[in-house]
Amino acid sequence: MIDKAAAGSRIAVLRKELGYSQAVFAEKLNVSTQAVSKWETGLALPDIEVLLNISWICKTAINTILEGEVLIDTHGGIDRGMAYISKYLICPQCRSRLSPNTLKRQEKLSFGCENGHKYEVADGVIHFGSREIPGELWSLWLRNYEHYLTQQHYPGNPRYMQGKPNYQEVMWQHIERLRPRIIIDMACGTGSGIKYMIERINWPVTIIMADLSHRILKYNKAYYSDEWKNPYVDMVYMACDCSNLPLADNFVDIVFSNGGFESMQAKMMAGFAEGYRVLKNGGHAIYNISCVDDHESDNTKK
């Protein structure tokens, strides 16, 4: 049973650390000042939606608020999103559970399993040792981060045959209706598809960007932290093979892909299988993929 008085004391401490009065805290949570007072004196507990908002505002896990459980040492560069998914990471080599290392001075954050496999966090990206497909080093067309930014700022070419609403809006309508808590963007590249969703999300969600290229994910980390940040959204970056995801079964609410599955080429069907494996019962896959309109055209044959 949850100790209401202890949970209330933790809420009060978190509120004071932010420098908020009960009235300001109540306004940010869209509740009454009396409700905050009842929580902090142990007379009541917030409902689950309010708890989620407290968790996001205070950057603290719900378990910590309710039970005082510290899930992970959050020093040394591990953020809230990474801390949250760390409970669901598995080793892509032996399928054992991964745990974060205990950080010592000058030591990099990493995740390891009982069999000695270790994966470092480099530039804010969990690097599972993946490499781009030989002969398909697509990320090299972006020469550096400045060139990456130029492409992110480019408005895009007109797509005359998309119809209205366009494919991004159709995908967004489904995501908005489902209001997922966990999304994985398969073979995400620069995130051109999920980018459209991020700026519209108005509920707490963790988005996992997964791609072979550590280089592109490093750029994504910088861009989505600085220029495209949404306070409701926690981003996690995993350089991994999407046909062998380092995630536990039945974990994700939505498997998302903006052309990512087809970019996996020979591994595309394995990517679908992995997406299905990590998807929760009752979860959804929302993706687009190219279709051939005319098999006899010169361009198709080429």
Image (cartoon, grey):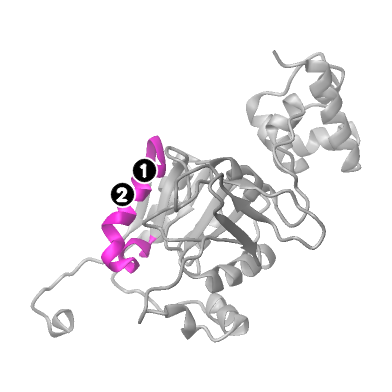
Number of the label disc, if any, that sits on residue 205: none
Q: Residue at x 66, y 67 (%)?
A: 123
14 displayed left or right of 200: right
Instruction: Indicate the quadrant where residue 76 lies.
Output: bottom right
- In the image, residue 159 sits, relative to residue 64, either above or below, namely below
Q: Which quadrant of the figure contains the C terminus?
A: bottom left
> How many C-alpha atoms fall within 10 Å of the one at disc 1: few (<14), some, or many (≥20)?
some
- In the image, residue 62 sits, relative to residue 198, either above or below, namely above
Residue type marked 1? Arg
Q: Which residue is mark 1?
A: 277
Instruction: Indicate the quadrant where residue 241 lies.
Output: bottom left
Magenta-drawn segment: 258-283
269 displayed left or right of 82: left
Secondary structure of the magenta portion, mostly?
helix
Q: Which residue is mark 2?
A: 273
Q: Nearer the viewer, residue 10 or 176?
A: 10
Q: Is residue 129 magenta?
A: no
271 displayed left or right of 17: left
Q: Residue at x 57, y 48 (%)?
A: 206
Residue placed furthest toward the front: 115
C-alpha distance separating marks 2 and 1: 6 Å
Tags 2 and 1 in contact by the CB under 8 Å rule? yes
Residue 179 location in percent, x, y? 50, 41
